[in-house]
Image (cartoon, rainbow, N blue to C red):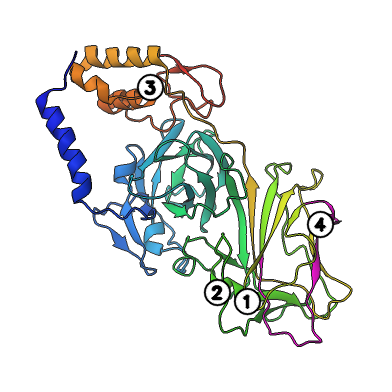
Amino acid sequence: MNTLPLNILLLLVFAHLSCFLVLVPVSAKVFLSIDCGSSSLEPYTDGRSMVWVGDGPYIQTGETHKVSIEPPNQFTWDSQVMSTLRAFPTRKRNCYSIDIEDSTTAERVLVRANFYYGDYDNKSSPPTFNLQFNGNSWKQVKTRMSSIVYEEVVFSLKKGNNINVCLAQTQPGNIPFISALEVRSLDSVAYSYVPSDYPLIFNKRQSFTNTNIRFPEDSFDRIWSTSAPGPNSTNGLLTVTSDSPSIIIDIDEKPPEVVLRTALTNVNSSGVLSSLGYNGFADNPLYPVQLNAYFSEVIKLSPTQKRSFDIIVNGNKLDSVNMILPKGPVIPPYGRALEVRIANVTSFPVNSSFTIVSKPTNDSTLPPLINALEEYIIGDKLVQGTNSNDGNCLSLILRTFYLTTMQIEDSNFMFIWSLVEALGLLQKSFIQLQDWSGDPCLPSPYTWEWIDCNNDTDSPRVTAL
């Protein structure tokens, strides 16, 4: 019977005992802000008390640059963070790899990628490229000359505590780049009405405050873009402010109180709120859309007042087509928050748009209102990732590593548990292979160039090295 060497046995015992000596808060949350392209080795704290770190520990490829056009000076994004970026002129795909410590709780995360081109390459040609996460396709990014573009995705971690965010080139000359990358853990119940094996891909998030809202007002650091009508608006819409001394937020998605203190309404008591600027999805109009609408009454109603309205999507009253939760007319509560979930909305394939209308019920004396709204596309089912239980390929990889480097002793083989770990060990040990990262096989056609995979689109196997 084989026995462990004494030094390894002592190491394991010490590691086991150290768990009782170090106090780790098991409820710690992930709140990671990465300043891409930063040359600073020291963390940087911005005006919102957010701590930013350089991206060196999370990626081994790419080139760092400073922008030529200064980023817009606004509170939503820090200008120092947006003034640098990392570009990827080589490889079809380049990936950030983020390991989340076991002491944190991150069952469901929000990942945000930020892009500010700023003519860093003096070509005046903002590129278009694709985003991927953990082997899944995310979204096509269309950057702009001198404005910030950002994309978000909400998903559940399926395997381990690693997050890969990849930028993939799709057209010659369109060099992918990224300015900032953020990871925020969410409460396990947030957005849990969508099955955990499907991602929510951000499309729009609106409030009717005077400015954009994010952390610290929003504990999840979601960005709520202002959509308040201007003072000279002629469409009959106006914003109103709540007179409630406090607003109780007891819904799972936890919209910040500040976005519930302002609402959009109609000047006419019998008027409607029509469309609200939602214009569908040109990329793929048939993907199902999830809408989360938030409501809170802004005044304490008298006995003769009532605010009640129906929500109509594409001409259908929602409770008649089983798309709304809760069912029935919307009656905003005073001093509390109400969330209405509108599920499985698809836009018209002809013009890639859909309409939302809030219409007063017959007994309502006040016009409809809305405080905030989120729009997400429900993405394809999350992939399992490259099959990690391929014993034959694992044996081949370990044998290759051992014969070519002689750096692994036989006793250390026991610490390699999976094929993916073995591939990672091989990749990190050869400088020629360190440009590859992310899932080895997914998504196709971005497989690592020095392996072959079969055609399984969910959990492919490595077939050759």
Which residue carries the number 4 mark? 319
Q: Are marks 1 and 3 in contact (CB under 8 Å)?
A: no
Mark toward the viewer: 1 or 4:
4
- Is residue 211 visible in this depiction of the protein? no
- The magenta span reads 294-322
Which x, y percent locates residue 227? 64, 69
Mark toward the viewer: 2 or 4:
4
Q: Earlier in the sequence, mark 4 or mark 3?
A: 4
> Quadrant of the image for the C terminus?
top left
The foreground one among 267 and 361 is 361
Which x, y percent locates residue 189? 54, 53
Which residue carries the number 3 mark? 419
Disc 4 residue type (three-letter): Asp
Q: Are marks 2 and 1 in contact (CB under 8 Å)?
A: yes
Q: Secondary structure at mark 2?
A: helix
Q: Earlier in the sequence, mark 2 or mark 4?
A: 2
Q: Secondary structure at mark 3?
A: helix
